[in-house]
Amino acid sequence: MTSPAGAPPRSPRAIGPVLTRYRVMAYVTGVFLLLLSVEIVLKYVFNGGEPVLGDWIAITHGWIYVAYLVTVVDLWSSLRWPFGRLVLLVLAGVVPVLSFVAERKVTREALAGEAVRQGRSTTVAQ
Amino acid sequence: MLRTALRPRWLALLALALVLASAFAALGSWQLGRSRDQAGDEPVPPGTVRLQELVEPQTAFTGALLGRTVEVTGELGAPTLRVEGRALDGERGAWVLNPMVVSTGDATATLPVVRGWVPDGARAPAPPSGEVTLTGRLEPSEAPTGETPSTAGASTVVSSVSSADLLNRWGQPIYTGFLVTDVPVPADGLTAIPPAPFDDRGFALQNVSYALQWWVFALFAVFLWWRLVRDAHLSETGRLEDDDALVDDEGQTEPDDVRARRGVTT
């Protein structure tokens, strides 16, 4: 949040931390999804169904995805984005690489929305 | 809020959310079931039972039979089959499989018996002749391969212990599944086969984990419905701002204003 010093906060809930949490989880989810993809290929294509790097990758990825969903719902509901976006973000966590792409787009739009809000408030204040 | 929730549109969405939640919950239960299968945590009843008291020939191999210790009397016969691709302690080798003719009262049936393991290259000793009494554990049939058995030297080579394949080869009646003897038969020249390890706890843990995750997703579905209804209710009553949303202190709710706050720029 970049509200002017001394000015009362314009919203009880700043988007900054919500967005940061989402961005961190988008990256972690993306990395683990890539790891999991590698493990699945190694396990089923080269190792006859026996774990190579270990089952912990699949288990950890599952819970990381749950945490990712929490941050996605939080962000979506804070920004009051349309429902379709929620669906896209939920899917972005299960398609390899897509979460990185989505993270960039989401950050850009969230900050643009924030800028509009800030800009409008400045206009009103004058 | 309740009036909003009771509109047909939101009731329909509620139905959808509940269907989704049920599907997720069912997937969770399925994963939990898989985890039980994988871990094999149904205890195997202890004690030795006569085969004929436990199972009839030509009937399905149920979970209750898995790993049971049975005692069976009969005659081991030809042919000796080598079931290839069976490692033991990291060494490549084969199981040695023979039909055993077992009396079932007024008739006889065939029980596939794996009587030990030999390393690749080693000859399998012939089975003892005459009537023998064996103890061992019951194992379920493996998947049929439909392969034509090849012959290597004097022995016939297969790659799986499949009731369907053996039925074609040996004729009926046949027991489904097979017996793995506790001690090699004969003891010379064969190695005992330890039970298949049930130490796949990792995989079971994975299934338990997936089960819990599906149930979390089920809660998500219901939560989202509630969230959407609440949004609809608040925007209808012109109170879009609420405790955890971005509040506009003018309280204005004209459409472009809402769109700007959503960050919808296009």
Image: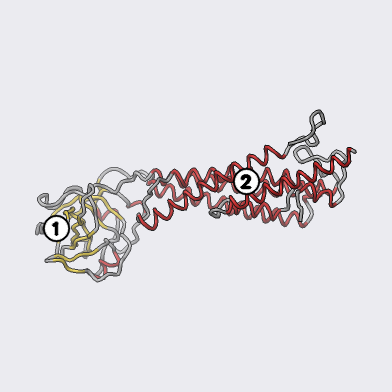
Secondary element type, mark 1: loop
Secondary element type, mark 2: helix
Q: Chain of mark 2?
A: B
Mark 2 vs mark 1: which is more N-terminal? 1
How was the colour assigned to the protein in this rendering?
Answer: secondary structure
Mark pair 2, 1: CA separation: 58 Å
Front disc: 2 or 1: 1
In the figure, is residue A32 to the left or right of A74? left
**Which disc is residue B66 wearing?**
none
Q: At 67% across and 39% down in the image, what residue appears? A: A18
In the figure, is residue B212 to the left or right of B129? right
Q: Position of residue B81 (x, y in %)?
A: 18, 63
Q: Residue furthest right?
A: A126
Q: At 67% across and 49% down in the image, what residue appears? A: A106
Q: Circle 2 is placed at which residue position?
A: B219
In the figure, is residue B141 to the left or right of B201? left
User: For the C terminus of chain A, which image quadrant?
Assistant: top right
Instruction: Tell me, yes or no, whether the two marked residues, 2 and 1, touch with CB atoms within 8 Å.
Output: no
Q: Position of residue B210 (x, y in %)?
A: 50, 47
Q: Amino acid at mark 1?
A: Gly
- Closer-to-camera residue (A8/B93): A8
Q: Position of residue A114 (x, y in %)?
A: 76, 43
Q: Amino acid at mark 2?
A: Leu
Q: Chain of mark 1?
A: B
Quarter of the view holding residue B95: bottom left
Quarter of the view holding residue B128: bottom left
Q: Circle 1 is placed at which residue position?
A: B121
Badge 1: how crowded within 10 Å, few (<14), some, or many (20+)? few
Q: Number of labelled discs?
A: 2
Q: Is residue A65 above or below residue A125?
A: below
